[in-house]
Amino acid sequence: MRSAPERPVRILGISGSLRRDSYNGRLLARAAQLLSAEVHYARFEQLKAIPPFDQDDEASPAPGVTAWRDSVKWADALLVSTPEYNSSLPGQLKNAIDWASRPADRPALRGKDAAVIGASTGMFGAVWAQAEVRKALAAAGARVLDRELAVGEAHAQFDNNGRLLGEALEEQLQQIVTCLVAEATTSIAARRAASLAGAP
Amino acid sequence: MTSTSLTIAPGIYHLDPVHSSAGFTVRHKVSKFRGSFTELDGTLRVSDAGEVHLSGTARVASIVVKSGAMEADLLSPRFFDAERYPQISFESTSISVAADGAITVTGDLTMRGHTESVTARGSLGTVEDDGHGRRLVGIDLETIVDRTQFGISFVQQLPGGEAAVETDVTLNVELEFAST
């Protein structure tokens, strides 16, 4: 049985699309609605403000980088929703993951739980992009759920209230957010047990 | 290890962590990469009937390799996930000792939340008096495990298709137990 954490689980939502009314933004919004009331959810909105990764800038990173890293550090878990560009993830999202994977000895992403979902206007729902995001997050030290949610033909998948029209998709999304919160709860309990045991 | 007798007197023996070590060896690209865990605990119990039971733990966060950055990587969810799984543990299910000190230990190894039965082979020796009135039991063991069975499924391929890090990992322990 999982023990209840001492504080609410914190989930950070990130859309890999910069477009104002993107389908991935809508998917994240729907995911946020499916989170239980006691979970703290925040969406990171400043992906565009993160400059390209440059090791020369690591000593004094731009404010956009600091805001991003601080957001990741705040969160127990990340929920990433990605579109697919040229069979892969958007460069801006990869760039953010790269910044959060540094510095190598204490990257912001290390030990964070993460789940990846995706929407595209094509048939396949960004499955390749999702796989790439999972791969990059895992390489950066995150604990990534081995699940995906592929919302294909996204322009026809949402009702006027932002719900997914397909019951199966709604159910999958619910399962993913529930699983992500459960994983984060387990991680919080593990960290607490380690601190009580005096581990570093 | 000096062996004076293979008869282990019944009783409880505790691990001497200073005179014990636990390490792993895995082929990395072309050479053997080694690491160890420095914080160990263990108990050897010998019943009046002569049955031997061995249990032990290693604290994952005590891992030592030749790079601090690599240690942090090994502790992350990519490998041991020390935050979630802070301990590696072993509990024997059967132990046999031959007349020449050859020992075979079968037991449950738990690592990264996965428990698998493993069999390790090695040698056992005893000293009746260590100069401080204690009996000592020394046990060296080696086994090979498939790390993917324990959820350590890191994969990286070299350009020629070879695995950068083999899935088979050799585990070695050299343990010294002292009577209480």
Image (cartoon, rainbow, N blue to C red):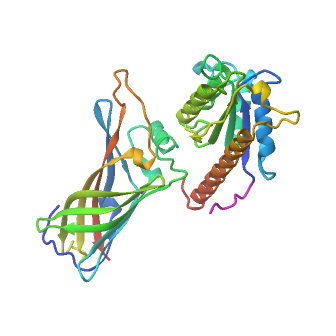
Q: Position of residue A133 (x, y in %)?
A: 60, 30
Q: Nearer the viewer, residue B108 or A162?
A: A162
Q: Residue at x 82, y 37 (%)?
A: A163
The answer to whether residue A102 is left or right of residue B165 is: right
User: Which residue is painted at 52% across and 43% down in the image?
Assistant: B77
| Between B172 and A64, the one nearer to me in the picture | B172
As displayed, is residue B41 above or below residue A115?
Answer: below
The magenta segment:
A1-7
> Within the image, what quadrant is residue B122 found in?
bottom left
Classify residue B30 by image quadrant.
Answer: top left
Seen as rendered, the residue at the extreme right is A160
Residue B103 makes an appearance in the image = yes
In screen coordinates, is B101 left or right of A144?
A: left
Main SS, magenta region, reads loop
Q: In the image, residue B151 lies at what x, y percent?
A: 46, 46
Which quadrant, please, contains the N terminus of chain A? bottom right
Residue A188 percent coordinates (x, y): 64, 53
Is residue A45 in view from this perspective?
no
Asked if residue B165 is positioned above or below residue A122 in the image, the reply reads below
Q: Position of residue B37 (x, y in %)?
A: 39, 51
Is B58 on the left-hand or right-hand side of B169? right
- Decide which of A168, A185 is in the foreground and name it: A168
The residue positioned farthest toward the top in the image shown: A86
Q: Residue at x 63, y 23 (%)?
A: A89
